[in-house]
Every structure is written in structure tokens, then in C-alpha cells.
Image (tube, rainbow, N blue to C red):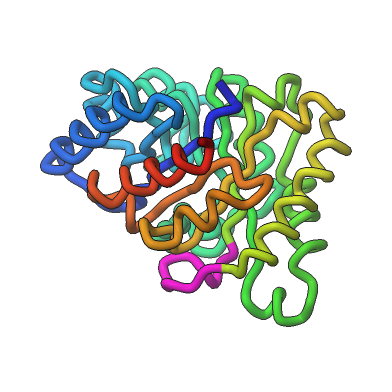
Amino acid sequence: MADRPFIVGNWKMHGTRAMLSEARAIDRAAQRHMKVEVAIAPPYTLIHPIHREAGQIGVGAQNCHFADEGAHTGDISASMIADAGAKFVILGHSERREGHGETSEIVKAKVEAALKAGLRVILCCGETEATRDAGNAVPYVKDQITASLPKVDKAGDQLTIAYEPIWAIGTGKTATSADIQEMHAEIRSLLVELFGAEEGAGVRILYGGSVKPENAAQILGLPEVGGALVGGASLTADSFMSIALAAESSEA
Ligand code: PGA
């Protein structure tokens, strides 16, 4: 149901099996908020345990390799995470682009591999503070999306975009409402250009970067904000589900 707000927890490199109780609490709470689609992308090691227990929430991964198998020590393929129970994968996160040298060309190959494995994709994009200060945020993000996307048949079902200004991730800073609105509107027109009116309109555009219970209602109430990609505040059921509740209220 791509019309529901999508609230996704990106646990990054946090969580051992001790965190399963938090995932259970999130799953239980999600059953009371069915107007919102709630999902977690835990570290690889927790995908299968959470998938086995979850009744309501979706489980995804934070990355995958572009090859299906082979001599890639330490890597994991899209079909492997799908086999573990993942339904989606986050690709092109700035921590992968910056910390692991992932170019948009590599991200595009990963998106292709993920779709082939039957996974939905959350494609991340976002500018640095210097790019925004120079007034180039919109063209930069549009180019990044265009370069990171292959042809997608059913974009509305298979694809989600997460706009995450890099300078807002984990910093406590968030973009202004006006900047978020402008960027999301520009992304929407690009999606319509790339995938046509119907499919392009069906792709949810999430905002990410220091989304917290305190600012969630304001951000999620903005036009073209179809949900949130949440890092730090997704690590406890209490704060994560407050954000889901804000998403549900923004729908009312
Ligand atoms: P943050 O992370 O909510 O901790 O800023 C968001 C993200 O990187 O997806």
C-alpha cells in the first residue's frame, strides 16, 4: 500500500540479539497503527531473527552487493538478504557513498540487482552543506537520483526515495520546511519525468536526517513527504513509534 506513510528505522551498525526485544515492541505497537507502514533495516545479523518473529513490520537491509554471488569476501548479495527475509534494501546512503566510495554508477548496479532479487529499494540522496550553501542542492540531488536509477518497471511499488541532506544526518540539524518542500517537489517532478505520471506519482519520498518525536509532526505534515528514514531515534520503540504516531496523525 504505497499510499500509507512509510516510517523506516535505519539501525546502522547498532544492535545485537539483545535488541530483539526492542524490535518486538516496535512490531506490537505497529499493529495498533495500521495506517502507517513501519519497517526496520537492522544489521544483516538481525534480519532473519526479526523476520521470523515480526507480524506487522517489514524488515530490510542497509546495503547489498551488485553481484548475485562470487568471490567477494565479506559482501552479501541481494538474493541472500531476500532469502533471510528482507523485503527491501536501503541503497546509496551517504555513509556508503562517502565511507565506502560508492559512486552513483555502483549504486545503480545495486538497485538493478536488488530489483532482480524481488526486493523493494529505498534509494538515498542528499547534498553536503557546502553544496547547499553554494545554492546547488536541487540540481545536485536530481543528478544523483538520475545517475543512481536504472529503468524501473513498477516504480510506484518497487521504489522509494529518501532525501537526506548529509549535514542533517546525526547532527540534530534539520532542513527548513521550505527547503524540504522545495526539494521534495523537485524530486516528484523528476520522478514523473523518469517514470511517467502514474508510476512517478506513486513513489514515496521520505525525509531523513535527525527526525525525532519532537519534529516529526511538522516534517511529516509537509506536502510530498511520504514518510521518514530514521536513524538514531529508531533505536528505541518509544521514540520510533512516537514518530509513527505523528505520521498517522498527519494522515488524519
Ligand atoms: P539520523 O539518521 O536520524 O540519526 O540523523 C538518518 C539516516 O542516516 O538514515
* Residue located at (71% from left, 47% from top): 105
Rendered image quadrant of residue 198: top right
Q: Is residue 239 above or below residue 37?
A: below
Task: From the viewer's side, name the closer residue of 105 and 38.
Answer: 38
Q: Quadrant of ligand 1?
A: bottom left
Q: Which residues are magenta?
A: 165-174
The answer to whether residue 186 is above or below residue 9 is: below
Which residue lies most toward the front here? 252
Residue 100 visible in image: no
Q: Write the residue at 39% across / 24% down.
A: 34
Magenta run includes residue 168:
yes
Residue 9 seen by the camera: yes
Q: In this rendering, is residue 46 above or below 176? A: above
Magenta stretch contains residue 49: no
Picture layout, residue 22 above or below residue 140: above
Percent from the top left, x then y, of residue 236? 23, 49
**Position in image of residue 120 (x %, y %):** 56, 27
Determine whether, in the image, residue 186 is placed left or right of residue 133.
right
**Identity of the residue drawn at 62% across and 77% down:** 129
Q: Percent position (x, y) of residue 18?
A: 11, 42
